Amino acid sequence: MECQAAITCPVYAVGGWADAYTNAIPRLLTGLPGPRKGLIGPWAHLYPHQGVPEPAIGFLQECLRWWDYWLKGVETGIMDEPQLRVWMPDAVEPSPFYAERPGRWVAEPSWPSPTIQPYRYVLTEGALTADTADTDAAAESRLDCLGAQATGIDAGVWCLYGQRTDWPPDQRAEDGRSLTFTSAPLTERMEILGFPDVTLSVAADRPNALVAVRLCAVAPTGASTLVTRGLLNLTHRDSHERPTPLEPGRRYTVTARLDATAYALPPGHRWRVAVSPTYWPWAWPSPEPVTLSVFTGEASQLTLPVRTPRPQDAELRAFEPAEGAAPAAVEALRGHERGHGVSRCRDRPRHTQRRDGGRLPHTCGRAGVRCGEHGHVQHRGGRAVVGHGAL
């Protein structure tokens, strides 16, 4: 069992919004008893001085400030600064790659921050209705979604390394395979920072089912940019230690916590929640095809962690420029970039991955299988097994 209270040494937790491990940073700031700081940039799974997307920072100088203070007793001022500093990204069009993310640095003196307040939307039929709205639009209805295994093919890479095709593309195709709930266009800018929660009243027609929830930002053009997501195995609704099957047809109220995020949505843009019972290849499919029912109304809500901009953000100490030692000399025997794309093969989505400089195509309608008559490439334990015929 995780016991953060046993960690008493000073901790500086650092990550990026495009990394797979960002949730640990706000969790550590919440649970650790000793001195602690957090830093989250826009980066993928890279060091911040090599950061993609930009802006990169002088991470080595920041580390030196931390070590000098705690190991040498040098007063560097690092503990006089806010406990959490993050990059607040501005809204962008969806793209499989970002060289940089526009935005600004913001900070919170402590975490959890008392300045972040929940803002709730009720899931109504096809819409997100502000919880403060004086309307009867929250009347309950039942919406069914039969899981399609293609849902998730536009999820992007689970742990991004800053490659050219790592980020999720436009989510409109994924939205079309899901139940969606979209807000009215915002009348003023809204910034979120933290963990969004989606509470759902659901039922399933099978004893084993999951729910995948995505939060997207919808531009006036209709483009849908993935902001964050979360998955919940519904047999884990009460406990991860003791999963219990669902009773088919019975209603349950569950909460899917989405990954920590920061995002600034401008006026004229809309929030969208998308719900599906499948999300391959991020989640293993349920044993049988599942029809998931979502009951709209007061029991189903989106809760956003809304942050009010602070004038102190403009006064934050600037990071030093990014710098580092010259890389070691290497001889490249073959390329190392990876990539992936989505097309259609025989009226089915086809997912192509290229690894090892493009030498190993990994194209599939099923995971690990090349579609067509020319053979297949299947990756096993880091090796590539090449053969012919269908698997």
Image: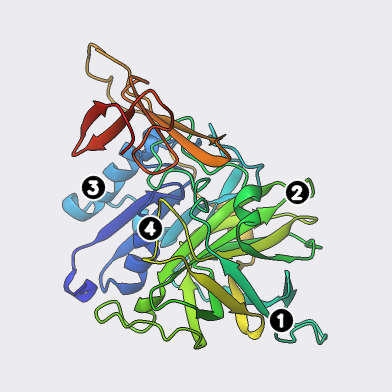
Q: Residue at x 19, y 68 (%)?
A: 7
Q: Residue at x 47, y 57 (%)?
A: 279
Q: Which numbered tag is attached to residue 222?
A: 2
Q: CA distance from mark 3 to mark 4?
A: 17 Å
Instruction: Return the disc, 3 or 2, that comes first in the chain's sequence.
Output: 3
Instruction: Return the disc, 2 or 1, that comes first in the chain's sequence.
Output: 1
Q: Amino acid at mark 2?
A: Gly
Q: Residue at x 32, y 66 (%)?
A: 28
Instruction: Return the disc, 3 or 4, that comes first in the chain's sequence.
Output: 4
Estimate the x, y position of residue 159 in percent, counting from the top left. 37, 45
* Residue identifier under label 3: 68
Instruction: Return the disc, 4 or 1, that comes first in the chain's sequence.
Output: 4
Estimate the x, y position of residue 376 in percent, counting from the top left. 33, 29
Instruction: Return the disc, 4 or 2, that comes first in the chain's sequence.
Output: 4
Q: Amino acid at mark 4?
A: Gly
Instruction: Return the disc, 1 or 3, that comes first in the chain's sequence.
Output: 3
Question: Which quadrant is the C terminus positioned in?
Answer: top left
| Colour theme | rainbow
Q: Residue at x 48, y 30 (%)?
A: 164
User: Circle 4 sits in a helix, a strand or a loop, which is it?
Assistant: strand
* Residue identifier under label 4: 38
Vertical order, 136 against 268 (above or below): below
Q: CA distance from mark 1 to mark 3?
A: 49 Å
Q: CA distance from mark 2 to mark 1?
A: 24 Å
Q: CA distance from mark 3 to mark 2?
A: 50 Å
Q: Badge 4 local density, few (<14 within 10 Å), some, or many (20+)?
A: many
**Residue 251 seen by the camera:** yes
Between circles 1 and 3, the one closer to the viewer is 1
Q: Amino acid at mark 3?
A: Asp
* Residue identifier under label 1: 131
